Amino acid sequence: MCSHGADMGSHFLDFDPLRRVKLTFSLPPLRLRLVLLLRLRLRLVLLLLRLRLRLVLLLLRLLRLRLRLLLLRLRLRLRLRLCLVLLLLRLRLRLRLRLVLLRLVLVLLRLRLYFTLIFVHLILPIS
């Protein structure tokens, strides 16, 4: 860097804040405005990039939460379907059991009827 200010673009490469201020105020007014406007534009661009990055991160979080919610809904649906199937199987088994019991009762009633008929036709006329 030249110390007499011939290299006007060198202030962008200088990271010393005091040196940067000295170089800025040693510039002509039009160039000073231009440098200040460029700095402001750079700050605004960086701020916009930060905001976009935050927005992307928030959208990614939202997407992750939506996926998690969808997964929970699917799990819940599967559990509900499984519970419904198990309940239907239990009801089916109960109905089958009732049907078997009713058939058994019907067979027993028939047997009773047969025994009653046998008793009435065979034993009563003898006595």
Image (spheres, rainbow, N blue to C red):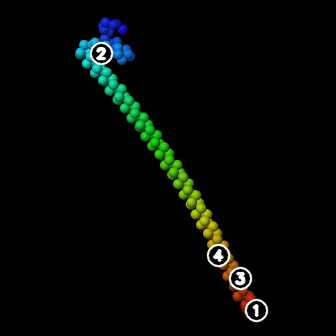
**Marked residue nearer the N-terminal end (2 or 1):** 2
Q: Secondary structure at mark 4?
A: helix
Which picture quadrant has residue 56? Answer: top left
Q: Secondary structure at mark 3?
A: helix
From the viewer's side, name the closer residue of 28 and 54: 28
Q: CA distance from mark 4 to mark 2?
A: 109 Å
Quadrant of the rendering where the C terminus is positioned:
bottom right
**Marked residue nearer the N-terminal end (3 or 2):** 2
From the viewer's side, name the closer residue of 55 and 37: 37
Kind of residue at badge 1 = Ile
* Residue wearing tag 4: 106
The image's mark for residue 115 is 3
* Residue wearing tag 1: 126
Give neighbour class at mark 4: few <14, some 14-19, many 20+ (Cα, 10 Å): few
Coordinates of residue 103 in the picture (x, y in percent): 64, 72
Q: CA distance from mark 4 to mark 1?
A: 30 Å
**Marked residue nearer the N-terminal end (3 or 1):** 3
Kind of residue at badge 2 = Thr
